[in-house]
Image (tube, coloured by chain):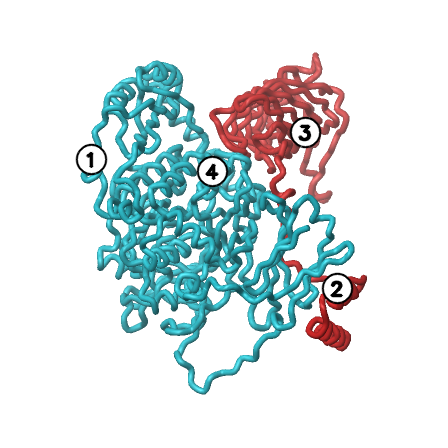
Chain colours: A red, B cyan
Amino acid sequence: MSLLITATDRRLRKFWTCLGPRARALAAAALLLPGAARAQQVLLRANVADDTLLNRTGPNRRYFGHLYMGGGLVAGPGAADAPLRHGLASAELQLGGRLKRRITQNVAVVADARYAYLRYAFAQTAAKTFPSPGLHQSETLGLHQIQAEGGLRLNAGRRGNTVGSYLDLLAWGGWVAGTTRTAADDPAPGGPARTTTTDAGLPYLRRWTGGAGARLGFDRYALVARRRFGPVRRPGSGPDLPAWVLGFEIGLF
Amino acid sequence: MGFPLFAVRRFLLIACLGALAGAPTAQAQTAAPAAPATRYWVALADKNGTAFDPQAYFSAPARARRARQHLPAFEESDRPVRADYLARIRAAVDTVTLISRWFNAVAVRATPAQAAALGALPGVRAVAAWPQQPARAAVAARRVAPVPPAAAADEPPYIAPEDYRLARRQTAVLGAPAWQRAGLDGRGLRIALFDVGFRGVDAHPAFAALRARHGIVATHDFLANRPDVYRGGSHGTEVLGCLAGRLPGGPSAALAAGPALGLAPAADYLLARTERALRETLSEEEAWLAAAEWADREGADIINSSLAYTEQRYFPEQMNGRSLVARAAALAAHKGMLVVCAAGNDGDTDWVRIGTPADADSVLAVGGLDPDTGLHLAFSSVGPSADRRVKPDVSAFGIVLSTTPGGRYERLEGTSFASPLVAGFAACAWQQRRGLTAAQLYGQLRAAGDLHPYFDYASGYGLPRAAFFLEKNAGRAVEPTFDFVPNDSLVAVVLRPAATTRPAQELPLVADAPDAPDAPGPPPPSAPAPSPGPGPNSPPYLYWHLADRRGVLRRYEVRAVTQRLVLQVPRRLLRGGDALRVEFNGYTATYSE
């Protein structure tokens, strides 16, 4: 390859230095033949039209979509027959997507779709009869939910292309796609180290749920409070479980 | 996108504490209006009847600057706002946060009801809500090397050889040896710095010489309204280091003045704190404007602002020179000050564009170059402005060695540091050509760029060359280095053989100077400025762009030249008056059809 380049170079130099414009044009035409020029190393390239496109989407544009994740703790007293273990034991995890439609600088509507896993952990006391009458080492209810949520967003102040500070007023509904009751027990000596029993498709839990909430946020971070209006337990299966979930969200953008 | 848990906890803790702290406060303020106070910009109608004595108001350097540039002793915008208007406004609102002569306006903190009442006051032309979201100094520095251990008090801090070399190159490429030979070091110039804070400047050995000669002539914190600026953030310390800092003198004289880190070690400095480092409030742009008026009054020749306001308050399409700070910067330029601003560090973020006030028409916006390649750094914000003006204007190293609190020197990156390097260059140029107006200097600094008249939106006109100011034949025509060869469908750019021949380098028997600019030690007296571009064993660069008939670029590229047929552009791209412009080895030519 280097010999070829040297020969081409010498030939081009001869044309360039000794001949007139027409010969130069001929030489250039020869060079422009396919394969004559090797690819050049581009160190910097910018297409200004692409760089300066006016975006219709963005944190404070007409439309803004992003993913988010959140977590919350179940809050409120449990039912007398279903005393709860509060803290991280009874909590909800969420992963979803959000679309925001800006109406004015200070008002927008948001629509979410998400998956939420809600877990209730029950204290194993003598008063506990739900979800099962027996005592176990630990006992939890897990609800796999598909939820949709709509809300009105009120922003404070004028801002640039950022989400800014906001208050969301929310209404949500969901379908409980799957339910499980998991109980762990210490087996008798000589048996396995641990015995876990899982029941799925629990008939005493409702399939549909819904509620309202509020979200106080600044850019990608938000504090959220949601209240469920419908009971988790089917009618006749006893007092309801706590309706509040308090937590936080982080926007993934 | 991961988010550390401790940060979540901290956020929740702060939010909860804030809520808890806010509740009793709100209850305690029973006499306060129901609606929360917010900021408003109150424009006044006139300045009729206000008395003004420029001799008393302006400092002697300020008067001298105006006289030197044949500017009037004062303008209408220098007159104070009317006291009667101001008294009525003070009585009607909670707080007056800024009084601006330049804009004949007042910034206030008021409730919506108070703001509505303001509009009815005599002399009030308009009341507008002030943007509420915090802006962020988009050009905050980032350390690119671990912090070296602190040295004992009686010995100079350790500086790694590669950092020492960088420190020398960051000024050498801007012609430091040539400026020194010409006796130009910013003496007689006043440079104002607007920044987050100057923590450590009052104790850092790098500024010992500056302090000894009382080179910091005035300071003011426009956020706390007091003179102490040696607190808050250290970003200003790092920026000042690139103007007036010095390396340690040597082991035997730890506090002696060593080689300069910037080009204006002999200038006088005005230090203004206009930004908060961590706890962001809503007053930065007001403080910037107040500092500009202060700098004007104190006789500043150059303002360096290594700050850029971007998406927290603006949209990209608003980077058209119409923001408050951009208009303030333009007014400062109109009053004879050269305003040098960092382009911003958003080149590799979604924002991409320069921030404001670098978008202002008469502000010298400075981009960042990679010291190793001489090419645009990816993080350096790019132009054009929203109204398609050339930005950034020029470029300098965006990775530097500078001063940090605690008597240390650290390798830092950001266009924050390219800006003071160019500000120092401008000080030397203005010291040499003192008769230039600020606008003329602005134009000559662009013309001094090593790419000029070529430009692109990454590096502007390139790295300013001291030779433009110091050599008589710097402006002479350059021999062509390439030819355009049109074909049926393509236009080829073919380099001339002579332009691609690299002369053999032969070492002299005895060097004129013991040290090359790249080497540690004192600067050589006669060596040429080293190029930040490709090294002697690397291919040279060819720059080309396509511009429309208005001169607005459609695309631009930089290529490594490995063969003489270096570029082929389809001729269909040149229809409608578009032009192909190419730069190679200092020669620029344009092809259009």
Q: Which residue is mark 3?
A: A114
Check contact, mark 2 vs mark 3: CB within 8 A: no
Q: Which residue is mark 2?
A: A25
Query: Compared to B451, does B227 lie above or below?
Result: above
Furthest residue toward top:
A236
Any mark on residue B321, and which?
A: 4
Nearest to the eye among marks 2 and 4: give it.
Answer: 2
How far apart marks 1 and 4 lie (CA) works out to 31 Å
How far apart marks 2 and 1 lie (CA) works out to 71 Å
Report whether mark 2 lies on the same chain as mark 3: yes
Report whether mark 2 lies on the same chain as mark 1: no
Report whether mark 2 lies on the same chain as mark 4: no
Q: Position of residue B320 (x, y in %)?
A: 50, 37
Query: Compared to B173, does B85 lie above or below?
Result: above
Q: Position of residue A6 (x, y in %)?
A: 73, 76
Tell me the amino acid under the disc marked 1.
Asp
Q: Which residue is mark 1?
A: B53
Tell me the amino acid under the disc marked 2.
Ala
Check contact, mark 1 vs mark 3: CB within 8 A: no
Furthest residue toward left:
B56
Mark before the other along the chain sequence, 2 or 3: 2
User: Which subunit holds the residue at mark 1?
Assistant: B
Q: Residues within 10 Å of mark 2 (few under 14, many from 20)?
A: some
* Most foreground residue, B426 or B228: B426
User: Which subunit holds the residue at mark 2?
Assistant: A
